[in-house]
Amino acid sequence: METDKHCSATDILNLATGYWQSCALHTAVKLDIFTVLTHECECRSPAEVASLLECDRRGMGVLLDALAAMGLLEKNGNCYNVRKSVKRFLVTGSSEYLGNIIMHHHHLVDGWAQLDQAVRSGQPVAKRSHGEEQERASFQLGMFNLAMAIAPKVAEQIDLQGRRHLLDLGGGPGTYAIHFCQVNPGLRATIVDRPMTHNFADKAIHFFGLQDRIDFLGGDFTSAAIKGEYDVAWLSQVLHGYGPEECRRIIAGAVESLSPGGLIMVHEFFLNKTKDGPLFPALFSLNMLINNPGGRSYSEDEISAMLTENGVRNLKRLPFVGPNDSYVLCGTVS
Ligand SMILES: C[S@@+](CC[C@H](N)C(=O)[O-])C[C@H]1O[C@@H](n2cnc3c(N)ncnc32)[C@H](O)[C@@H]1O
């Protein structure tokens, strides 16, 4: 029998104010405080940072203290600097920069404040106001930030020896296609995504010098057949954007594009069998409810059933585990 886990008033209050820390971090990234504190000078007073960023001195002072309390900055006297272990993630220009995905999370905040509406109606909440261009850029570059933390490890761990052509379905900026191609010299890849994603993918492909091996097909994969023939299909963080019926159709389309013996891989934040955990996939379902008409996190059993119905065999979970409990389920078609 499961024992009741002790929950104190402090635990509840910490849950209630958890977003304060998120908002402090979002603001520091939005104002680029970590970059200013690193590049301009190793240590700055609140008055100096406020002046450099055209902010109020009192406002900057309390923000810097809060960031120090959160363990992101160090304070010596009246001087603040960025903790060494933090710089690689929060200073602009670092290959491990997470600022774009943090800005994407910032753009989600006002939707989360309307969660009650989404729960009442079962529909996404009203459109918000950060500007379509800015939101799209943070989303795509944010996907790039996240995937850059995972793709090198995934590509090293997945055996694609002998495979020739990879479909990166809903590949966004193509981070995974890029890393699979880097690790497998005989492989080429096609990213299929919405046309508006093309320039993000182009930039990433050119940055890694892979324009001869990776191409981009713009289109909507829910309304048109996927062009081309592939021997690997990679679906990373795509299915959670759709309801179960659409997921079945998307998987059917991917399977259709594979030659016999083709490998299909699904990378998601998987829920457990009872869907009451792990925490991140469970909360991610709420994020989909707020922003998307049918999407949610799925359990491994649910995705396995969809793959099996579409003729995928030899299903297995790969040993890789990413941040936020993501992992990869794969199988082959006959
Ligand atoms: C959450 S992102 C994942 C990006 C990438 N696979 C990754 O893991 O980093 C989902 C991507 O799927 C694309 N997408 C979703 N539905 C699509 C559709 N119907 N047709 C084309 N692309 C779609 C989005 O534009 C977005 O780039």
Image (cartoon, grey):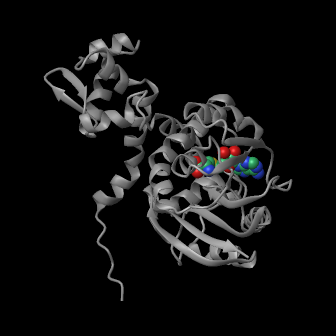
Q: How many marks?
A: 0
Q: Residue at x 31, y 19 (%)?
A: 58
User: How far from the left and from the top, in percent, is residue 198?
Assistant: 71, 36
Q: Is residue 263 visible?
A: yes
Q: Position of residue 312 (x, y in %)?
A: 69, 75
Q: Is residue 288 above or below residue 73?
A: below
Residue at image location 44% in from the left, 47% down from the top: 149
- Residue 114: tell me if it is visible: no
Residue, far left: 77
Is 328 on the left-hand or right-hand side of 279? right
Residue 42 lies, with reference to residue 99, above or below; the image says: above
**Residue 286 falls in image quadrant:** bottom right
Spot occupied by residue 221 in the image (x, y as percentages of width and height):
79, 53
User: Which quarter of the figure is the N terminus placed in?
Assistant: bottom left
Residue lying furthest right in this view? 224
Which residue is at a point 69% across and 46% down the rendered structure image? 191
Q: Is residue 2 above or below residue 276?
A: below
Q: Is residue 196 above or below residue 165?
A: above
